[in-house]
Amino acid sequence: MNLFFKYRIWDEKYNCWDEAPITCYPYEDFKKQGRMVQWFTGLKDKCGTDIYQGDIIRYKRNNNIFTAEVVWKDFGWCLTETGEESVPFCYLVPEEIEIIDNIFQRKKKKK
């Protein structure tokens, strides 16, 4: 049985998305290679765009608008607003989620 996972890779050396296909081996450390793997959450935003780990999204909750980073916590995909407090994806309505950035391109813009 072959399992395929959707991901994208940020190349920190060249500050861009690496489009080349990769083969992942157990315990391979991409960080040492200057590459960061971001996993697909299995969810899409209101425009139908795939949501990945590290995306910065805007979402509506209790009639308030928040901005947060998509992270993997012990129990699943969450949104982290402060670095400590997190909101599980199951509390959100996909039609109220919009990707506005990602952690790597945001760093690139600040330089």
Image: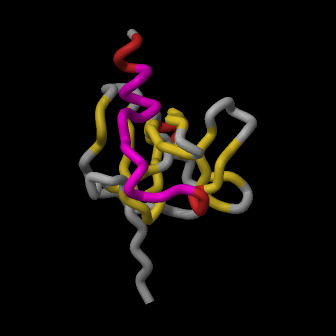
Position of 64 compared to 9: left or right? right
The answer to whether residue 84 is above or below residue 71 is above
Q: Does the magenta stretch include residue 106?
A: yes
Looking at the image, which residue is at 43% across and 20% down? 107
Q: What stretch is highlighted in magenta?
A: 92-107
Looking at the image, which residue is at 38% across and 63% down? 6
Provide residue 28's location: percent of width, then percent of height: 55, 53
The answer to whether residue 54 is above or below residue 43 is above
Say which of 63 and 18 sits in front.
63
Provide residue 2's location: percent of width, then percent of height: 41, 83
Residue 5 found in image quarter = bottom left
Looking at the image, which residue is at 29% across and 32% down? 16
The mark tally for this picture is: 0
Quadrant where the C terminus is found in the figure: top left
Position of 60 compared to 73: left or right? left
Quadrant where the N terminus is found in the figure: bottom left
Provide residue 24's location: percent of width, then percent of height: 46, 61
Residue 92 found in image quarter = bottom right
As drawn, which residue projects farthest toward the bottom?
1
Say which of 92 and 101 sits in front.
92
Q: Is residue 78 magenta?
A: no
Provide residue 66's location: percent of width, then percent of height: 53, 34
How is the model colour-coded? secondary structure
As drawn, which residue projects farthest toward the front?
63
The answer to whether residue 79 is above or below residue 94 is above
Looking at the image, which residue is at 42% across and 50% down? 96
